Amino acid sequence: MLPVMVLAAGLGTRLRPLTEHCAKPLVPVGDRPALAHVLDRLYAAGATRIVVNAHHHAAQVRAFVEGLDAGAGVALSEETDLLGTAGGIARAAPLLGEGDVLVWNGDILADVDVASLVAAHQAPSQATLLVQPLPAGRGPVGVDAQGRVVRLRQDRFGAEATGGDFLGIHVLGRGLRERLPASGGLVEDVLVPAMARGEEVRAVLFDAPWQDIGTVPTYLAANVAWLRERGLDRWVGPGAQVDPGVVLDASVVGEGAVVSGSGFVVRSVVWPGARAVAPLTDAVVTS
């Protein structure tokens, strides 16, 4: 299994105001922080060397990593200045080692066949992106009939057969890693220039549900999906208290939280230790 870089340093601006209180990868989804779900998927794939970077609420991310079981194989790369997705990987090079690396955005939850993605990355491809297919011309990615990425955002390098959404999960090849800038973004500063030079970037299509917790609506949807995947219509954490007059529907109540009042709580998330008053719909209640 390749070393893994989990990108967890971003400011989480689209998820404000939640990220004013919490690092985005640590917002709770169901019974655990989002980052814990990502790590579980990576462990299931056989990952033994994982690096998580941190900048925004770095102390929270550090405490999470330090709280993992001994032997979890997770190292922390803290960034005093926010370096961007490319710069973050470059800074973590001593922890990752050399060669190809699997990159996973810390705000993406997906049941990925990691082994198949890694196996699909073959020379001369410089990177292999996981892409959800869409009709041609739609989404930020275009893929040709041979599986090559020919469009990223507005930059086009060939005729596409399929559009798509990039999941933020990909294999970054050794060649591009050796040319990463000290700061900058993977798409605009690395992948697009590589494609402009004629270098190959390929796609693996992923036609299954996935969750991006980057906005409040998608964060709520991720919690509802977590319940649905387990056949639940509610989840109440240890030590939580819910008044008898409260009816939970597609909602998550975190550990030690309190929900008082009466009426329905629908498609809502009450964070661990928070206090909420019913009725509520499409709400996130923080501590």
Image (cartoon, grey):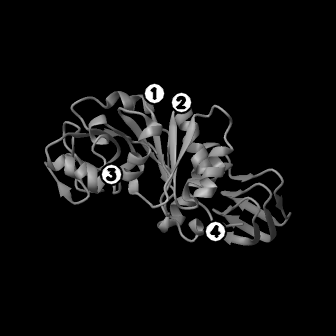
Q: How far apart are labels 1 and 3 at the CA level?
A: 22 Å
Asked which secondary structure carries label 4, the reply is: loop
Q: Tell me whether the residue at label 4 lies in contact with that at label 3, contact meaning CB atoms closer than 8 angstroms.
A: no
* 115, 89: nearer the viewer: 89
Q: Is residue 116 left or right of residue 154?
A: right
The residue under label 4 is 283
Pointers 4 and 1 in contact (C-beta within 8 Å)? no
Q: Are marks 2 and 1 in contact (CB under 8 Å)?
A: yes
Residue annotated with mark 1: 1
Counting from the top left corner in percent of width and height, residue 182 is at 34, 53
What label sits on residue 186 in the rendered view?
Answer: 3
The quarter of the image holding the N terminus is top left
Residue where numbered disc 2 is placed: 48
Instruction: Mark 4: give few (<14), some (14-19) or many (20+) Cα within 10 Å.
Output: some
On screen, residue 39 versus residue 285, left or right, reads: left
Determine the CA span between mark 4 and mark 1: 39 Å
Secondary structure beneath disc 3? helix
Q: Quadrant of the C terminus?
A: bottom right
**From this viewpoint, is residue 254 visible?**
yes
Q: Residue furthest right?
A: 244
For badge 1, the amino acid type reads Met
Amino acid carrying label 3: it is Leu
